[in-house]
Amino acid sequence: MTARTSTESARDIPEATVARLPVYLRALTTLSEAGTGTCSSEALAAAAGVNSAKLRKDLSYLGSYGTRGVGYDVDYLRYQIAREIGVTQDWPVVIVGIGNLGHALANYSGFRSRGFRTVALLDADPTRHGEMVAGIEVQPFDDLESIVAEHGVAIGVIATPAVAAQAVADRMVACGITSILNFAAGVLSVPAGVDVRKVDLSVELQVLAYHEQRKAQGELA
Amino acid sequence: MTARTSTESARDIPEATVARLPVYLRALTTLSEAGTGTCSSEALAAAAGVNSAKLRKDLSYLGSYGTRGVGYDVDYLRYQIAREIGVTQDWPVVIVGIGNLGHALANYSGFRSRGFRTVALLDADPTRHGEMVAGIEVQPFDDLESIVAEHGVAIGVIATPAVAAQAVADRMVACGITSILNFAAGVLSVPAGVDVRKVDLSVELQVLAYHEQRKAQGELA
DNA sequence: TCCGTTTTGTTCTCCCGTTCACAAACTCCT
DNA sequence: AGGAGTTTGTGAACGGGAGAACAAAACGGA
Ligand SMILES: NC(=O)c1ccc[n+]([C@@H]2O[C@H](COP(=O)([O-])OP(=O)(O)OC[C@H]3O[C@@H](n4cnc5c(N)ncnc54)[C@H](O)[C@@H]3O)[C@@H](O)[C@H]2O)c1
Ligand SMILES: NC(=O)c1ccc[n+]([C@@H]2O[C@H](COP(=O)([O-])OP(=O)(O)OC[C@H]3O[C@@H](n4cnc5c(N)ncnc54)[C@H](O)[C@@H]3O)[C@@H](O)[C@H]2O)c1
């Protein structure tokens, strides 16, 4: 239902912009680590791989954090974007399905360093229980409810086979998870108010194949 | 350069549509396996998780493969989409960087079944050489050129740390690879004519966090 | 053969996102 | 203090994609 109340918080930022903010954040972190104190929209845009006009417009949705004639203070802007995205706080995450992909995700250090803390690894297969992955013990999927309640988990990752994905999503939603990152193929149906993002590597490769095929066709002209 | 010659092949399909064709393809495969011979745009759209008008418009770019009053022949449409995307043929692929993620990718059966054949696993770390992953031996990264030449590889996957990604991409491009799927963070710069698609899991999680934060804010109203 | 029903293919309109272009604002130099 | 040079923030034009709506086409039954 999500009743979209009147206060509806501050301004709302276009989806396309939201998807780019993390990219800017990473570029700023790189610049900061390189010792850069200030940068122009042109320089930051180059580092992020976008058009500078687009970058400025994106940043303008957050407020006026730059100085005309000078540019942006790297650390200040970085903090503002991090705050806007919500990665100044720590987000507890559960990963369900500790197979090939689940192992890789659990071992990935990039999540922790960006404000996401894996609080549990869950799998339905009893033979996997007790295994330690990246310092965390694999637990039964049935522990989901208690873990979510205990840690206040809002974000869940699904790395199970496609056939199990909908059932896993249903359980997640039922116990209060409102954001899901799904690696399984197929469409997940969830109630309004729950966000789902899907990562589908096959689609990516197939899009590449399409363009590749067109290049090949063009060559015999 | 890619000189975009005059013939420029048939009609060109909007990018947004190209990205959805693989989704339709998967939905059709599922329907076919379930024994469905014919389906309406409404039914297929539901299976693919999109609007039916959008689906029909997408399909109209390929041609008129439906029958008014009846719908689409599942297997026929499936073949037409597969042909358009280019997955009726077999695409040889190399994966570079056989760490956490590289292992998961190599073990993933979904690629093979969709027309992508992993012909080599490459890593710069000598201690990994000789290891068998999914029936393929990990080879030195320096074998890249000979493997690409031998198998006519056009698509490369980068699963190395971010610092190595640009160098790997350069080597790939130099030996004739024209499509890259990149899992490493940061921006790859490649010459015109080379397609790069990037998968960034941190970005996905951060977008979820943004919306999650907004939901939380709304609640205290 | 003719009419009602179903469903496609396409046209039209609207909206979101991208990009251009420029005034406003700030710095630095003289 | 003033002018030249920079760079931001934004108004406006533009392009592409999403969805509604409908005419054209096929089918089935009488
Ligand atoms: N491996 C990859 O590189 C890759 C790439 C793209 C997509 N995917 C997708 O990601 C998913 C996982 O892939 P994978 O290669 O890790 O598969 P996998 O078979 O190695 O792992 C799946 C895990 O999920 C567990 N599981 C099964 N049903 C479950 C349930 N109901 N509840 C909890 N856990 C359950 C299994 O025990 C297993 O450990 C698949 O849907 C796959 O299509 C994987
Ligand atoms: N593991 C994940 O779930 C995950 C998630 C998101 C993004 N990523 C990204 O994917 C990439 C790989 O992640 P990972 O966890 O597998 O890292 P990893 O360190 O486990 O593996 C990297 C592999 O690349 C090899 N390598 C390093 N330099 C190389 C070079 N120049 N040429 C060839 N091979 C080289 C290393 O020997 C190692 O085997 C990283 O950029 C990471 O940020 C990983």
Image (cartoon, coloured by chain):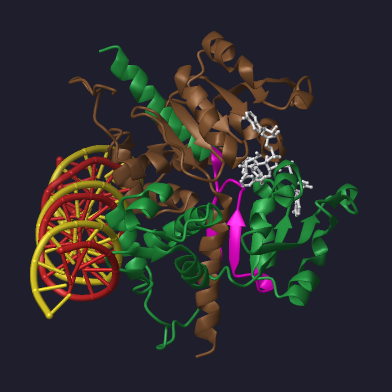
Chain colours: A brown, B green, C yellow, D red
Residue plotted at (67% across, 26% down):
A124
What's the residue at 79%, 26% (across, down)? A127
Q: Where does the image place residue C3, in percent across and percent down from the top left?
A: 8, 66
- Locate residue A87 relative to residue B156 in the image: left or right: left
Can residue B193 be spotted in the picture?
no
Which portion, as a residue range, is magenta?
Answer: B173-201
Q: For this rendering, which residue is in front, B59 or B171?
A: B59
Ligand 2 found in image quarter: top right
Residue B70 in the image, given as x and y percentages of width and height: 32, 64
The answer to if B196 sits in the magenta stretch is yes
Q: Is the magenta stretch mostly helix, strand or loop?
A: loop
Q: In the visual, does B149 lie left or right of B183? A: right
Total marks placed: 0
- Pick the front one: B6 or A201: A201
Check the image and name the residue furthest to the bottom. A221
The quarter holding residue B69 reads bottom left
Up/down of A195 relative to A19, above or below: above
Please tell me which residue lies in front, B120 or A77.
B120
* Position of the N terminus of chain A by quadrant: top left
Where residue A57 appears, x then y in whole percent? 29, 45
Work out whether B163 lies above or below A170.
below
Q: Residue at x 37, y 47 (%)?
A: B46
Magenta stretch: residue A168 in it? no
Residue drawn at x 47%, y 67% is B81
Above or below residue A164? Residue B121 is below
> In the rendering, at what x and y percent does residue B55 appear?
34, 58
Is residue B29 at least partly visible in the picture? yes
